Each structure stands twice: as C-alpha cells, then as structure tokens.
Image (tube, rainbow, N blue to C red):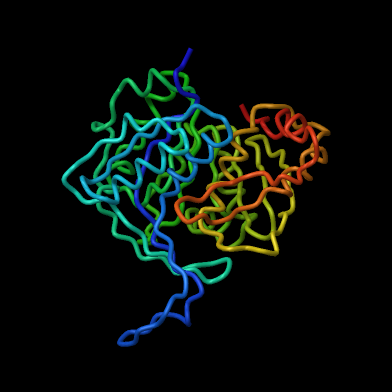
Amino acid sequence: MSQYQIAAIGELNVDIILNRIDGEPEIGKEKFAKDMTVTLGSSTAIFAANAAALGSKVCFVGLVGRDSFGDLVKKSLEAKKVDTRFIMEGDTPTGATICMNYGEDRANLTYQGSMDVMGYDDIDPSVFDSCQHIHLSSLFMQSALLRDVQKVLDIAAKKGITVSLDTQWDPAETWKLDYKAVLPKVTIFMPNEKELQALTGKSGLEEAIAEVQPYLGKAMLVKCGSKGSILVYKDGKRVELPAFLNKNVVDAIGAGDSFSRFYQRFRKRPLAGRLPDYRQPYGRCKYYRRRRNRSLYLSRSRPRNSQDKVWPGIQAVI
C-alpha cells in the first residue's frame, strides 16, 4: 500500500499579498496598500495544503533556498500536515510573488528563484514508489520541470500512478507545451478557460475544448470563474455546474487551486443522477484569507451529514 495518496511536485514560494490598494501602480509614483499578508504561495503548495486539510495523505516534492522564506514555506505546509521530507534546500533563494489584489483579479510580479531550478533528476526516485497520484502545476514558472515533464509522466505511467495537471498562466505567453504529447499521459487536466484558449491558440472556449478533447487522458475540468465549471470527458460527455458566489470575498488568490483540490478529493465516486445532492454542500464552501495561511473550509452551517452526501460525490473520472 502506498504511503501517500498524493505527491505534489512543483514550485514553492511565498506570496506577499497587497489588498485595498489606492489605484494601479504607476512608474515614478508611490501608492498605498492598506492591507498586507505574507503567506504560503504557489499553486502546487495551495493544492497540497488543501488536500491534506481534506484528509488526504500528502507529500511535497520541491526546492527552497536556505532562507526565512524557505522556512515559512516548510512550516506552513507542515502545519497543514503535509509531509515535507522531499523538500530540498539549495543555494538559490526561495521565490516570491507580490500579489496586488483588485477584487476578483490581481496583478502579480514574481521572482522565480529556486522554483525554476528543480528538474526530474533532482527528485528522490522513492517518491514514485510511495504515492498513488501526482499533481503538477505552474509548469511555465518552472523551466527545468517543464523540460522534464515527459520523464515524470512516463515514470508515473510505468508505476500506475494517476496524474493531474494545472498548467496555470504562462508569464512569457509563449505556451511552449506540446499538449498533444502531454495530455494523453495526464488523467485529469485542470486549466481555466483563459489558459485553455491561450494554450490552444483558439479565441473561443468551445473551440479550445474541441481542440484538446481528442488528446485527453480521461477528462478535463475547465474552471470558468463566476460562470462555474465544465467537466469534459474524452468521449465527449460533459457536466456543467454554475458557480456558487460568495458575496463577502476577501481575495480570490488561490481559489482555483482550492477548487481543483476539492474536485480531486471527490472525483473517484459515481456521478450519475446525483449531482443535485452535492450542490448545496459545495455551495457553502468559502475561500478566505488568514494571516498565516489560506485554505478551503466548509462552513459550520453546512447540513448535517453533508459529508455523507459529498463523499460519494464528484469522483467519476478514474
């Protein structure tokens, strides 16, 4: 039996989140932000923290610098019960992202640092004998891992490990990922609509879905923000659900990663005819910001035994 249900492999950084900002940055001028939080960042790390918070046994494979940001990253993951034994330390400083938050959107400025260094040869090979599932994210921020992604996918296939992939945005906007070769080896692909359109070079969402569908491993979950989400199977079957909107949003940073993890937690169980049972508990999920960390949680007002309804829920892919 595998020691871990999930091995999250990818980037590690801190987020310096600025809220309540007096306008957009302008060259030669200084603006005030009335709120700041320094916390665990990275798409892959937020996914891992939420996976552990939802009860999965999770380890993280990554690289940080020998610095205070690296210490914060590891302590934050350990506080969420994520096993950090596979996190390495190196000479390159830990990366950081300054997030200037404007409602449901933001502008980010990232120093990649150590997140751009780790490749396949740096990964402890015992990881692949210890997990049932691998999650990959933010490939375009990790040039070494992007270069070696086929090696990771090949060993996962050899070991019978399922894989989820959330590419995230490409800051360089070159989108140099051969999705025709990569996606057949990915169990569940998790882009948002803008990322999918940019990756495929298609201007419309339906065109982009049609472009990648023949290459899907098993399914694709497209995150469409306030419009909800679309689950697309390789055979063309799809499930669409509206969003459940929170009127008291603090910030939306990491919300897509939390949603991906929530889906992943429930993806293996039957869907047919039962979606309405799960909509209310999912609708009560809230994304919020804490001073030291961010996570997904179910409100205390959820219906009694709602987990009994959710647990048999959304997991139909594998």
Tell me the quarter of the image containing the C terminus.
top right
266 displayed left or right of 185: right
**What residue appears at the point 32 percent right and 57 percent down from the top-left corner?**
96
Give the residue drawn at x 46%, y 52%: 168
Q: Position of residue 281 (x, y in %)?
A: 75, 43
Q: Quadrant of residue 130?
A: top left
Front-lying residue, 31 or 145: 31
What is the residue that sits farthest to the top in this orientation?
1
- At horizontal 49% and vertical 58% (from top left) the residue drawn is 198
Considering depth in this image, is 157 or 236 the residue closer to the camera? Answer: 157
The percent position of residue 2, horizontal first and vertical second, equals 46, 16
The residue positioned 44% from the left and 18% from the top of the image is 3
- Residue 67 locus on image (x, y percent): 22, 49
Task: Say above or below: 78 vs 17.
Answer: above
The mark total stands at: 0
Quarter of the image holding residue 224? bottom right
138 displayed left or right of 5 = left
Above or below residue 217? Residue 11 is below
Where does residue 47 sit, x and y in percent of width and height?
A: 49, 42
